[in-house]
Image: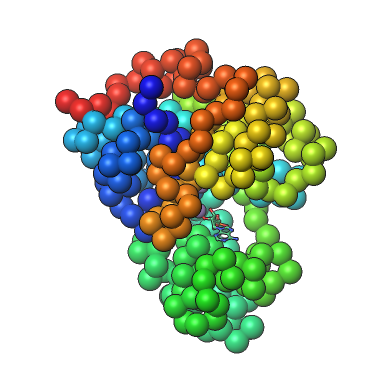
Amino acid sequence: MPVYDLHCHSTASDGPLSPAAVVRRAATRGVGVLALTDHDETAGLAEAGAEARRTGVRLVPGIELSVTWSHQTIHVVGLGIDPDHPDLAAGTARLRAFRDWRAAEIARRLEKAGIPGALAGARRHSRGAILSRTHFARFLVETGHAKDVRQVFRRFLVKGRPGHVPGEWATLEEAVAWIRGAGGLAVIAHPARYGLSATRLRQLLGAFRELGGEGLEVVSGSHTPDDNERMALLARRFDLLASAGSDFHGPENPWYELGRIPELPAGCRPVWQSGAWQAAIGSRPAARAS
Ligand code: AMP
Ligand code: MN
Ligand code: MN
Ligand code: MN
């Protein structure tokens, strides 16, 4: 069985490697099926697809959408999307416009806190791609305001901190509709990472299932082994297909490495063995070695 890695990032969002470099790295790490899932952006998929054909990796065109659900930011991965679908394209354009506004607002707040130049600094790191908090984090590390990216988030970029700006992302309903409308499967990303209580997580999964969402990222690079087991039980309980992804961003976080993904716990229905996958991805012209 090939190794499936269905969640990772490139320079099209907040990863430091180009889409082609991500695919090459996946190939050397033994990944057989890779989904590139940049935040609110599909611009990396063409380059990744071309490199996938050269290296023999099978590329699943993906995205990771930012969602506001019940005052909480949630991420929804789309697998097997048509990146040119007009509703998805219009929806992500709106999210990117919000990102631009938010970036200016983060910079304004940081300036008030005595840190000028953050917008230009973040832009230098994003190099024309979407503006993510990760790019602000890199600027703040480089200018000596924190020792690493984790510390930046704690000090500056989370709720209650000077550079925090609340999200106004897509609704859960919109995100699921855009993904499914574009022929893809909707998957709740890294469900254990939101810090939701068991009750709220059940509410989220119930609402998601009701809207037509198909999958849960049971195994994530950002989960503990215990998280993976708990999410496997929830996937069964809500009759959701199980997905797995490293959430690889770049070589500087070696614990989220491409293809370094534990097996799905027993009792899960792997998303790649489902009829929904066959319909959405199996029949699509595959990015195989020619
Ligand atoms: P944004 O979508 O612009 O709000 O940025 C969210 C991104 O920031 C995530 O996808 C992660 O890549 C990164 N991130 C969020 N929280 C942290 C953290 N505590 N430490 C390091 N990176 C983080
Ligand atoms: Mn990210
Ligand atoms: Mn995420
Ligand atoms: Mn991600």
Query: In the rendered image, is residue 179 in sight?
Result: no
Residue 283 lies, with reference to residue 31, above or below; the image says: above
**Left/right of residue 108 with respect to residue 126 in the rendered view:** right
**Left/right of residue 243 with respect to residue 280 in the rendered view:** right
Which residue is at a point 38% across and 71% down the rendered structure image? 124
Between 46 and 98, the one nearer to me in the picture: 46
Horizontal and vertical percent position of residue 104: 54, 70
Between 53 and 285, the one nearer to me in the picture: 53
Between 255 and 96, the one nearer to me in the picture: 255
Horizontal and vertical percent position of residue 262: 51, 36
Horizontal and vertical percent position of residue 228: 62, 36
Query: In the rendered image, is residue 283 in sight?
Result: yes
Which residue is at a point 73% across and 22% down the rendered structure image? 237
Horizontal and vertical percent position of residue 54: 19, 35
Which residue is at a point 68% across and 48% down the rendered structure image? 194
Which residue is at a point 59% across and 70% down the rendered structure image? 151
Quadrant holding the N terminus = top left
Q: Quadrant of residue 81?
A: top left
